[in-house]
Image: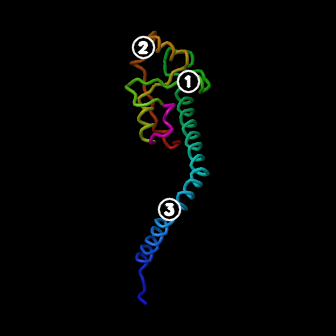
């Protein structure tokens, strides 16, 4: 009998596996469904937690980026800080769960962080934010 190289043995094993999967399609589908029910949901939860930590760290670091605001220097809980897009947005950061890491970073770089009061003023056109700085995310990207 001819001895197979490791590459040939691996190729034969892969071929046998694919044949079995083709002939046992119903078992494969049940297995995948069970696996995603137990693992897929946990991955979503973990990603959502990482996003929350990423946003919280950015907000704690920058605080309110309005230089005339009281909360520009004073610490404020991250739930009272909002991302405000200075440039055209492709998606809202609250809906970023299924987006790629690079897309989320690019979207955050278009934003400034404002306290809830300043954000309401911007919404009602009582505060001009065109000169406010945007977020530099480089030191936080490892959190995603």
Location of the N terminus by quadrant is bottom left
Disc on res. 128: 2
- The disc, 2 or 1, on the residue closer to the chain's N-terminal end is 1
Q: Give the distance between the C-alpha atoms of the residues marked 2 and 3, in whole angstroms.
A: 60 Å
Residue at 44%, 11% (x, y): give it. Answer: 125
Label the magenta part by its dominant secondary structure.
loop
Give the SS element for disc 3: helix
Q: Give the distance between the C-alpha atoms of the residues marked 2 and 1, in whole angstroms.
A: 17 Å
Coordinates of residue 78 in the picture (x, y in percent): 59, 27
Nearer the camera: disc 3 or disc 1: 3
Name the foreground residue: 72 vs 59. Answer: 59
Color theme of the render:
rainbow
Coordinates of residue 61 in the picture (x, y in percent): 54, 30
Mark 1, residue position = 81
The residue positioned farthest toward the left in the image shown: 88
Coordinates of residue 90 in the picture (x, y in percent): 40, 31
Residue 97 falls within the magenta-colored stretch = yes
Name the foreground residue: 139 vs 20. Answer: 20
Mark 3, residue position = 25
Nearer the camera: disc 2 or disc 3: 3
Give the magenta range: 93-100
């Amino acid at each position: 009998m001819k001895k197979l190289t490791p590459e040939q043995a691996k190729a034969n094993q892969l071929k046998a596996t694919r044949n079995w999967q083709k002939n046992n399609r119903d078992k494969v589908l049940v297995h995948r469904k069970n696996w995603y029910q137990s693992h897929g949901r946990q991955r979503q939860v973990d990603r959502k937690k990482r996003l929350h930590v990423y946003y919280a760290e950015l907000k704690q670091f920058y605080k309110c980026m309005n230089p005339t605001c009281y909360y520009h220097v004073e610490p404020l809980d991250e739930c009272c800080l909002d991302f405000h897009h200075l440039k055209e947005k492709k998606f809202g950061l609250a809906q970023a769960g299924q987006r790629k890491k690079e897309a989320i970073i690019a979207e955050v770089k278009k934003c400034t962080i404002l306290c809830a009061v300043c954000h309401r003023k911007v919404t009602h056109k009582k505060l001009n934010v065109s000169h406010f700085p945007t977020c530099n995310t480089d030191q936080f990207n490892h959190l995603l």
